[in-house]
Image (cartoon, rainbow, N blue to C red):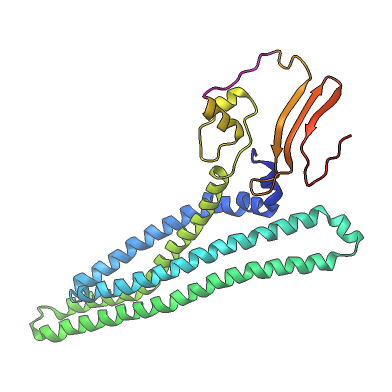
Amino acid sequence: MKAPMSFFDTTPTGRILSRFSKDMFSVDNEIADFVDLFVFIVLQLIVVMVSIVVITPYFAVVLPFLGYLYIRAMNYFRQVSRETKRLESVARSPVYSQFSETLGGLSTIRAYGKSSKFVESFGGLLDLNSRTIYCNKASDRWLATRLEGIASCVVGLSAFFATSVVVSNGASIGNPSNFASFAGISLSYAVTATGMMQFVVRAFAQVEAAMNSVERITYYTEEIPQEAAMTSKELESDKPSDLMNTAQKVVAATGSVVHPAKEWPTSGSITLTGLKMRYRPETPLVLKGLNVKINAGNVLVSSVEPVAGKVVCC
């Protein structure tokens, strides 16, 4: 609320609305659900792998290789999922902005007969947003194909090692029916691991993607420059930061805050000495040294340096 006007002049309204709608919803609801799902499935997957290793110990030999392929595919997918989610958040802001602006100027749009043009523009923004969502879904299908292959290896190796135990031990097994039941448990767990491996990666990717909302909200709460404090007492309570405004820089340089008297101002005079102003930090100066003294009821311009080669006084 205390951001400078240059921020509101250069930031689309939809981008701000997106922070207070979709991003806040992700922080309040989605992240907790995704973390809960991720922890639950990870614990289940650990139990499944430990059960297979206990029943068929040889499976522990190939488990590190399968884990390497699994982690590599997951890391490759995470990068794509995170960036496509960020692009989807950026592409969603113009949709909110254009829709709110259209509702605000609806009477003007109808008066000039431009309804079809605005509908076409809104459709183009929706298409752009849908492209980012499609890229995210395509990467999800890419991951599913790789994980299905790894899960098939888990099932096949589990069946192979269970068979090798029976063949190697043969009749020496005390009670073959007991091992048959254990082998069935191992195979059934290996089959369920197929879906679990996909859910683990997707849940982790969803948590990481939802953290984009935290990043976007954190930027708005901590990185946006703020206007100067309204009162001297409020200025004293301001904590130093990397984005100090002019008043905070003066306090940091002088080490004190001026407290005006309660009867201030005693007169209505205003004096400006060497005033230099620009619209934004990256734009050129529009006032290059303005000296003005405003007395009670009249204006006296003592000197004005030329701007763009022209001076207009009245």
Residue 17 at x, y percent in the picture: 66, 51
Tell me, yes or no, if residue 189 can be seen here.
no
Quarter occupied by the C terminus: top right
In the depicted view, which residue is nearer to us: 63 or 9? 9
Q: Quadrant of residue 102?
A: bottom right
- 153 vs 206, left or right, is left
Within the magenta stretch, is there residue 256? yes
Name which residue lies at 51% across and 52% down: 215
Name which residue lies at 49% across and 72% down: 140
Residue 1 at x, y percent in the picture: 65, 39
Name which residue lies at 69% across and 61% down: 95
In the depicted view, which residue is nearer to us: 109 or 147? 109
In the depicted view, which residue is nearer to us: 314 or 50? 314
Question: Taking 135 as reference, is 37 above or below it?
Answer: above
Tell me, yes or no, if residue 278 can be seen here.
yes
- Most extreme residue toward the right, as rendered? 111
Name which residue lies at 57% across and 64% down: 87
- 113 vs 302, left or right, is right
Q: Quadrant of residue 271?
A: top right
Residue stretch in magenta: 255-262
Residue 97 at x, y percent in the picture: 71, 56
Within the magenta stretch, is there residue 76? no
Chief SS of the magenta region: loop
Question: Taking 136 as reference, is 259 above or below it?
Answer: above
Q: Quadrant of residue 71?
A: bottom left
Question: Taking 291 as reference, is 178 above or below it?
Answer: below
- Most extreme residue toward the left, as rendered? 172
- 52 vs 96, left or right, is left
